[in-house]
Amino acid sequence: MESVARPFPNPNLNIRTLSSSSPRGSFTVSRVPFDQWRNRPSLRAGRHRPVAAVANPSSEHDVVVVGAGIIGLAVARQLLLSSDLSVAVVDAAVPCSGATGAGQGYIWLAHKTPGSETWELAARSKQLWEELAESIRDQGKDPAEVLGWKKTGSLLVGRTLEESYMLEERVKLLNQAGLQAEYLPASSLHSEEPALEIGKEGGAALVPDDCQLDASQTVAFIEEGNKQFNSQGRYAEFYNDPALSLLRSSCTQMVEGVQTSKNNLYAKRAVVIAAGAWSGPLMQSLIVQPNLLPNIPVKPRKGHLLLLENFKDLQLNHGVMEVGYIDHQVFTSSTRSCTPGAVEDDDNLSSISMTATLDVNRNLLLGSSRQFVGFSREMDESIVKQIWDRAGEFFPALKSLDNKIDKIRIGHRPYMPDGKPVIGPVPSLPNVFLAAGHEGSGLCLALGTAEMVADMILGNPITIDHTPYSVEGRFC
């Protein structure tokens, strides 16, 4: 995990140098750039076992999962709990090194649209998260301590008449879908969030059952649970060990596993690619003839998140999100948000939308930015300032505070142009499954995605319709 700090000219935005002993995930960057994968050698199609000057150690598993973010680890967990299969997880870095560790932890439905193609997956995933939190309680533990779990409710807020009308309509849709949701005009909102200022024309959609969690705590919990299967020979981890190529049978051309920089990991049942923003380029680099693969247009969408530790100068009762965040989830060069006040930059297709949460440790998290700048890991001081200024427009108390931004999280969301993740088998690669492209919803959608992938591998009936997420017929 890297720690980076740079001086900032604004005296209200002093960025403290991070210690090398900072907890994993405190400053999170995507670790392995595309050019390292693009230039790696691939195995030739006819070779059954790779031959190298020094042979890699080999091991055999039922399923090999490439990617140790929340999606990959959740897939491993689901397979371990619902079958007797053995699972290996491989990653170029370590858990929480990508978008997972840089996230804000929303387990929300407020910003999802009932009837949309992703609605069922979001609702199912939230249900599974709630069941997990309840199971932790049943064991006599506190999910707040284990997962950083908080049932704070969510506020989706707008500051104009147009946005207020949009939020009223959204509340109606959420109610029709069976969710408890309430529209709050500005006059009623003050009692819920005294520090929040949206003007007389503003309003908010309140969804009291929305929750949040801490990504680092949750990943640690899932990983610890997975490791309980070590003693049965059913679980193994291979970190800091980049995947280089797929191992294929010389007779059947079936994918037999994954060659990494240090190991040959054979998979008797399936290989799952869950490498976040790297999944598209990684798929292209893993095989000999990438032109035979459908183009999987997963691309990195960089984000900054500001963290103020043990923050007591602002009371925040709910998770808060500007309604413009919804428009910016799907954003291409041919589309522009019509939401007033949101900041966009045509040069690198960046956008800023206010988000604010207070975690179980009273850390204030402020976001959020979206940029198409490749796999850049550099902190962008102008983006940091825009996030801070945007937050100050909604929380005026921040403008007068000479607080330090203690940490800045940077990650790369796995963006898909159509706003839907890609989940399912790869038609031209038998036994290979993709689970990527969740953009800013990886944490929220993780358990539903894991359930879907595991059911596909095991041949079980799929709980929800997986057609919207399929590879086949979706990409040219």
Image: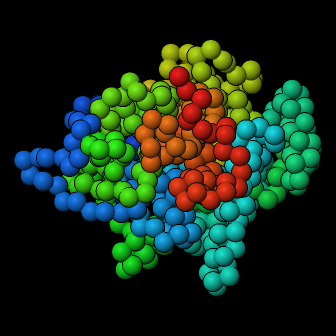
Residue 94 in view (yes/no)? no
Quadrant location of residue 132?
bottom right
Q: Is residue 30 left or right of residue 111?
A: left
Does 229 appear above or below 23?
A: below
Farthest residue toward the left? 53
Farthest residue toward the front? 251
Farthest residue toward the bottom? 140
Viewer-side residue, 142 vs 407: 142
Image coloring type: rainbow
Quadrant location of residue 400?
top right
Number of numbered callouts drawn = 0
Residue 26 horizontal/vertical position (percent): 44, 54
Residue 433 in view (yes/no)? yes
Q: Is residue 62 left or right of residue 212?
A: left
Residue 415 horizontal/vertical position (percent): 54, 34
Residue in view at x 92 percent, y 42 percent: 172
Viewer-side residue, 188 vs 321: 321
Residue 224 horizontal/vertical position (percent): 45, 72
Viewer-side residue, 161 vs 178: 178
Quadrant location of residue 87?
bottom left
Residue in view at x 43 percent, y 75 percent: 229
Residue 452 horizontal/vertical position (percent): 61, 53
Does 84 appear above or below 70?
A: below
Residue in view at x 63 percent, y 83 percent: 139
Residue in view at x 38 percent, y 24 percent: 291
